[in-house]
Image (cartoon, rainbow, N blue to C red):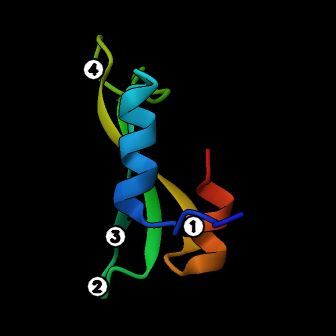
């Protein structure tokens, strides 16, 4: 069985195909960490009243092992 290569784009496309409002991004100075981006409720203590787009750090490196963690 051939294993599909894991890429950030492939993971984001699977999330999009599943109609899940979340995307995976590589962030940081050298694009070394993975984050999710989604519309989430305001953080506690925030002045915002409605949900808005936020990044959620996964604290995993953007390498094959980190992508395996994000695999859907």
Q: Name the residue under label 4.
A: 48
**Comparing labels 1 and 3, the label whose residue is closer to the camera:** 1
- Between residue 40 and residue 6, name the one nearer to us: 6
Q: Which residue lies furthest to the top in this view?
A: 49
Which picture quadrant has residue 51? top left
CA separation, marks 1 and 2?
18 Å
Q: Identify the residue position indicated by label 2 in the image.
A: 29
1 or 2: tag closer to the N-terminus? 2
Across and down, in percent, residue 24 comes to: 40, 52
| Number of other residues with Cα within 10 Å of mark 3, as a class: few under 14, some 14 to 19, many 20 or more | some
Q: Earlier in the sequence, mark 4 or mark 1?
A: 4
- Which mark is first along the chain, 2 or 4? 2
Depth check, front residue: 25 or 13:
13
Q: Is residue 46 above or below residue 25?
A: above
Residue picked out by circle 1? 67
Depth check, mark 3 against mark 4: the one in front is 3
Q: How far apart are marks 1 and 3 (CA)?
A: 13 Å
Name the mark nearer the viewer: 4 or 2. Answer: 2
- Res. 23 in view: no
Q: Which residue is drawn at 36% across and 32% down?
A: 16
CA separation in Å, label 4 and label 2:
28 Å
Dot 4 alpha-carbon crowd within 10 angstroms: few under 14, some 14 to 19, many 20 or more: few
Q: Is residue 4 left or right of residue 41?
A: right
Local crowd size for mark 2, using a 10 Å CA cut-off: few (<14), some (14–19), many (≥20): few
The numbered mark at residue 27 is 3
Q: Quick check: marks 1 and 3 in contact, CB under 8 Å? A: no
């Amino acid at each position: 069985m051939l294993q599909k290569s894991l890429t950030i784009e492939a993971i984001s496309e699977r999330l999009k195909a599943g109609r899940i409002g979340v995307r995976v991004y590589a962030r940081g100075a050298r694009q070394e960490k993975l984050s999710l981006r989604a519309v989430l409720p305001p953080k506690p203590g925030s002045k915002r009243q409605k949900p808005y787009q936020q990044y959620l750090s996964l604290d995993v490196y953007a390498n094959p092992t980190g992508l395996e963690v994000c695999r859907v």
